[in-house]
């Protein structure tokens, strides 16, 4: 089954996607990761997106949709998780067209529900490995050695957009642009809600149950 994972920044979409990928062999398509890879590689797209992302705004739809279209060209029948896309109604409409063109369909749009109070804490405490991309949290999931990745020994960094001053912009963009997407999938009859609070494993079980 192809799914969307959506929810506010800090809901844990990336963490759960990584588990789904590993355990169910799903293809993980994260627009945030794709943008960050483009920024790291200093591509034309990365150069366009960097300032926008660093200040917490959404990258324009045409750029984002174009990037996702390219990812669809690389697909080969593996079930996928879309993480962080669509984030606007225009993106949701574009996705429907893209699915139709490729003879694919979407099983469920899974909303990870986490209340506002937790989000800021999750985001400000997040640290990401600059080499392998693994994520940690200073309180909830600290690395064995401070500032060093458990997996590969790489340096842990804080994303620029995880600084407190940027988080409010991201949450506002979420409320204005992404909450309407929720209605879109409710109307399409694809919407399911999963409690995003609690242990990572428990949240995983809730999501996996939706896929069974
Ligand atoms: P989070 O879900 O924690 O906010 P992501 O890694 O998914 O983080 O996204 C980081 C940033 O990348 C967003 O704040 C936004 O600037 C940009 N971005 C990611 N996906 C999209 C999208 N579908 N449309 C527009 N901008 C996006
Ligand atoms: Zn690492």
Image (cartoon, helix red, strand yellow):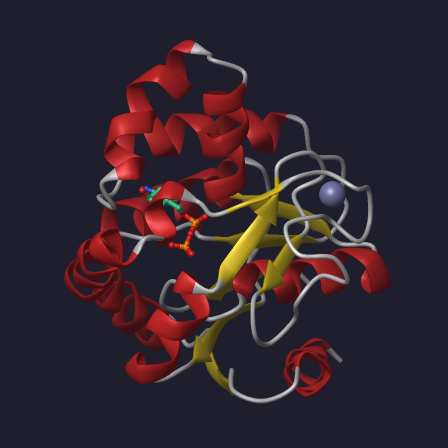
Q: Quadrant of residue 73?
A: top right
> Quarter for ligand 2?
top right
Q: Quadrant of residue 77?
A: top right
Q: Residue, x 26% and y 28% (percent of image)?
A: 51
Q: Quadrant of residue 156?
A: top right
* Closest to the observer, 45 or 125: 125
- Residue 197 in the image: state x and y as whole percent: 52, 87
- Residue 202 in the image: state x and y as whole percent: 69, 88
The quadrant of the image that shows the N terminus is bottom right
- Tell me: residue 28, above or below residue 144: above
- Residue 174 in the image: state x and y as whole percent: 25, 61
- Residue 49 in the image: state x and y as whole percent: 32, 26
- Tell me: residue 96, above or below residue 55: below
Residue 20 left/right relative to 167: right
| Count of marks overlaid on the render | 0
- Tell me: residue 46, above or below residue 188: above
Asked if one can make out residue 2 in the rendered structure from this viewpoint, the answer is no
């Amino acid at each position: 089954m192809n799914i969307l994972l959506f929810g506010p920044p800090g809901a844990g979409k990336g963490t759960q996607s990584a588990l789904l990928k590993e355990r169910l062999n799903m293809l993980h398509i994260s627009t945030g990761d794709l943008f960050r890879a483009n920024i790291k590689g200093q591509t034309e797209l990365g150069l366009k997106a960097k300032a926008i992302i660093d200040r917490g705004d959404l990258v324009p739809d045409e750029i984002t949709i174009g990037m996702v279209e390219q990812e669809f060209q690389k697909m080969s029948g593996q079930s996928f998780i879309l993480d962080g896309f669509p984030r606007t109604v225009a993106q949701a409409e574009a996705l429907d067209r893209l699915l139709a063109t490729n003879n694919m369909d979407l099983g469920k749009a899974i909303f990870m529900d986490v209340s506002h109070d937790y989000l800021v804490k999750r985001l400000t405490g997040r640290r990401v490995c600059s080499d392998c991309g693994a994520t940690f949290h200073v309180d909830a999931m600290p690395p064995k050695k401070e500032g060093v990745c458990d997996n590969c020994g790489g340096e842990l960094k804080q994303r620029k957009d995880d600084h407190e001053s940027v988080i409010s912009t991201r949450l506002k963009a979420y409320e204005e642009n992404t909450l309407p997407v929720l209605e879109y999938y409710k109307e399409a009859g694809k919407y399911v809600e999963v409690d995003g609070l609690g242990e990572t494993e428990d949240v995983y079980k809730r999501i996996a149950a939706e896929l069974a």
